[in-house]
Image: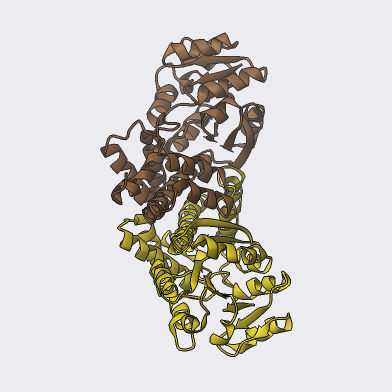
Chain colours: A brown, B yellow
Amino acid sequence: MIGFIGLGRMGSGMAANLLRAGHDVVVFNRTAEKARVLVGQGAKGAESVGAACRGEVVVTMLADDRAVEQVAFGTDGILERLGKGAVHVSSSTISVALAERLAQAHAARGQRFVSAPVFGRPDAAAAGKLFIVAAGEDAALAAVSGLFEAMGQRTFVVSNRPAASNLVKLSGNFLIAAVVEGLGEAMALVEKGGIDRRQYLEILTSTLFGAPVYRTYGGLLAEAKFEPAGFAASLGHKDIRLALEAAEALRVPMPLASLVRDRFLALLAQGGERLDWSAIGMLATKDAGLG
Amino acid sequence: MIGFIGLGRMGSGMAANLLRAGHDVVVFNRTAEKARVLVGQGAKGAESVGAACRGEVVVTMLADDRAVEQVAFGTDGILERLGKGAVHVSSSTISVALAERLAQAHAARGQRFVSAPVFGRPDAAAAGKLFIVAAGEDAALAAVSGLFEAMGQRTFVVSNRPAASNLVKLSGNFLIAAVVEGLGEAMALVEKGGIDRRQYLEILTSTLFGAPVYRTYGGLLAEAKFEPAGFAASLGHKDIRLALEAAEALRVPMPLASLVRDRFLALLAQGGERLDWSAIGMLATKDAGLG
């Protein structure tokens, strides 16, 4: 029996893939409607967080630190209800500090903790094509490797310290935002020089920059298409803030990350909360007096 | 008869590919030794810049604005010696302003001008695998398209204004430097968090960042291997300066380009002139008190 807590755009696809792989899954979501969809696909519905913690594994896929803290440390929460030796798999993009706190709290209760954030947007979650970055003790990782196979196309084990995978995830989101900022500045420059953005992007992706990150985010910037948000600017801002918090704790100055953080603040200040996070890449265009 | 001026690490490979494709090539280089190698491969040697300008096309592949200005505007230079209707193909990475000046000066003398900077390091030049970004009038481009086929794997025509291709090239080099800065900061962060740089790079290039720019420069940063320089830091600095000059002329604020410029200044201040330009990516590591 696998518990699954958090059935948003990412979690619902991940839980559905666990069902499809033949696992018994019991789901919980704060708003019950989303759970009903999964129950229609064969999941059991749990009435509470605690009721989703009766099996050998519980997976959490929630929006932010606060949501994870509530379900983990709250009354009738995961810490209180999960059995000894059972594994909590946290796939949310949370802070390094919270991952460390969870690792300690679970260990103190004889529970096991695997931190396994993912790369991929909701379509990849639905298709079972996520990339999973996992960290934890070997035996705990071995116990959940079958779940990773059902939810992702590849799993990277980076450390036996769970929080290391959160550092990889946060730094990866920083690198995506850095690509968006670079592309945004370059596109503003060439556009003002009379060159078509789409042709420019084709040159980039046909030569040195032929990677999904350039195709995906370059396409959004070339079309200036930021709604509906695949990943909201407010969440992008949160991740850059968490990367900078980790950098501060580790004493790593990151001037480009600081610049990107300020771009997010400008975007949010100008009403961009619900736009896709790649909309930070249009600020250079605006600064240049275009569009 | 094709003239070829500038037989450095890039130009010697390009000229050799013109010979291999069956063209008559007359070569000139400021230091004569390098010309002798090409003469051994079947080229004619010219005694002067002017003597390399007797055919229907002359190609220049030189290090910077100053070198191009000398061979173009100097006594016995290209402007003075090239015939009416003949084409000057400039493949050097020069400023937008100089490309505009060359276009005007050639037009005033009834000569034609194509600006065709390239993407690719010396090994790509030798293998005929360059990417060529070309701009100029249609008839002039048509007259030299066979030469591009001999030197490159693909040609992108971006505009009939020659300087547009220089803007694409300079912005592309800015994007490479931006990737290096982002990777440098991210690698410093994860390394200080106990994660191996090589494994981190493998995660990146196996997922969203699977492009030559990440493999090439990420590899250099993971190994901290900056000698011998494939492209020297002093030249990288020059290109970022030229991108910022173009941005200033066009009124395009580029905060990330400004940050990268300062990284180059720091690297040069610390004695990095002869290192590969990707060594700017180690400054974050140094700032973090590592290595």
Q: Position of residue A141 (x, y in %)?
A: 63, 33
Instruction: Report whether B8 appears left or right of B183.
Output: right
Q: Which residue occupies the foreground of this view, B163 or A139?
A: B163
Above or below — where is B45 with respect to A175?
A: below
Q: Which residue occupies the foreground of this view, A164 or A62?
A: A62
Q: Position of residue A125 (x, y in %)?
A: 56, 28
At x 46%, y 48%, the residue is A179
| Residue A135 visible in the snapshot | no
At x 40%, y 21%, the residue is A74
Instruction: Report whether B95 appears left or right of A145.
Output: left
Q: Which residue occupies the foreground of this view, A100 or B206?
A: B206
At x 44%, y 77%, the residue is B109
Above or below — where is A59 with respect to A261?
A: above
Above or below — where is A77 with respect to B131?
A: above
Q: Which residue occupies the foreground of this view, B83 or A246?
A: B83
- Which residue of the protein is positioned furthest toward the left in this rendering? A269
Quadrant in the rendering for residue B87: bottom right
Quadrant in the rendering for residue A149: top right
Q: Position of residue B267 (x, y in %)?
A: 43, 70
At x 61%, y 28%, the residue is A128
| Residue B16 visible in the snapshot | yes
Quadrant in the rendering for residue A146: top right
Instruction: Report whether A169 appears left or right of A232.
Output: right
Say which quadrant the N terminus of chain B sits in.
bottom right
Above or below — where is A22 with respect to B236?
A: above
Q: Position of residue B164 (x, y in %)?
A: 44, 60
